Image: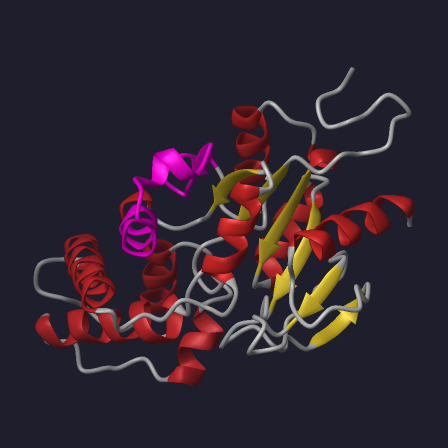
Amino acid sequence: MTPGMDSDETPTLQALIFDVDGTLADTERFGHRPAYNQAFDDLGADWSWSESEYGELLEVEGGYERLRHYLAFYQPDFEPEAGQDDFLDAAYERKNQYYRERLASGAVPLRPGIRRLIAEARADGLRLAIASSSLRANVMALLSQILVEPPEEVFDAIVTGSDAAEKKPSADIYRRVLERLELDASACVAIEDSENGCLSAVRAGVTTIVTTSSYTGHHDFTGAALVADSLGDPDRPWRVLAGLQPGTEYLDINALRLIHARAHRA
């Protein structure tokens, strides 16, 4: 029998898979963008990424790839003394250092419902996993800030951009998560915040819930089972924007199982 299927072939929800940047916390607005700008200032580059400019750059998955894309298409005449590759390496290293400092200082807030849903999922016996295009060290830094226990004791699989051959929107990261969990895609639900993340999960066959973040409200989330403005909390209801309507004020375990079941009946 395929893992995640019961005797009459009805999918049984067994695991919840989280993206990281924009999904667990508003890392792009409060962490990555200001960290990039600090790094540019350190290195004497006379530019600063605005909110709108950074929103455009987020179409490129991966921080290093995003920086290389910026130099190629936004600053084609920029010629650093040490050479472009050395500049890229130095800027990316400094940016990551500043990002982790911002995490440690508490400058990057968790999104509504994250702590609650992780706790509820664990209490309900669901397995947890991470599927992120980000650098592994940055992912682990965030997880270490939001969890009391070591991340490896909470999440059964942590797959990042450092572990996969292709970043999102490729399904590679999700397929690797499923391999490590030893589960079929039908046994899982993914929570994402971006078009590329949604595409990645959907292409892997995973039921996908999207919570739009600072830069992704305008994205195309075709294929998502549900799109909302957040996971919500009892004192901070979510707003369901598209897809299945679970009839609740926030995403709890019962609503999660309902969405998963309805997605597989549709």
Residue occupying the point 52% across, 42% down: 122
Q: Is residue 156 magenta?
A: yes
Relative to 200, say whether 154 is above or below. above
- Asked whether, in this view, residue 187 is left or right of residue 237, the answer is right
**Closest to the observer, 115 or 239:** 115
Q: Which residues are magenta?
A: 138-165
Residue occupying the point 41% across, 70% down: 26
Observer able to see residue 218: yes
**Closest to the observer, 68 or 33:** 33
Relative to 105, say whether 204 is above or below. above
The image position of residue 54, as x and y in percent, is 40, 76
- Asked whether, in this view, residue 85 is left or right of residue 29, the answer is left
The image position of residue 104, as x and y in percent, is 19, 62
What is the quadrant of residue 46 in the picture?
Answer: bottom left
Relative to 151, say whether 209 is above or below. below
Q: Is residue 126 magenta?
A: no
Observer able to see residue 75: no
Q: Which colour scheme appears in the figure?
A: secondary structure
Residue sticking out furthest to the top: 1
Quadrant, the N terminus: top right
- Asked whether, in this view, residue 107 is left or right of residue 240, the answer is left
The image position of residue 112, as x and y in percent, is 50, 70
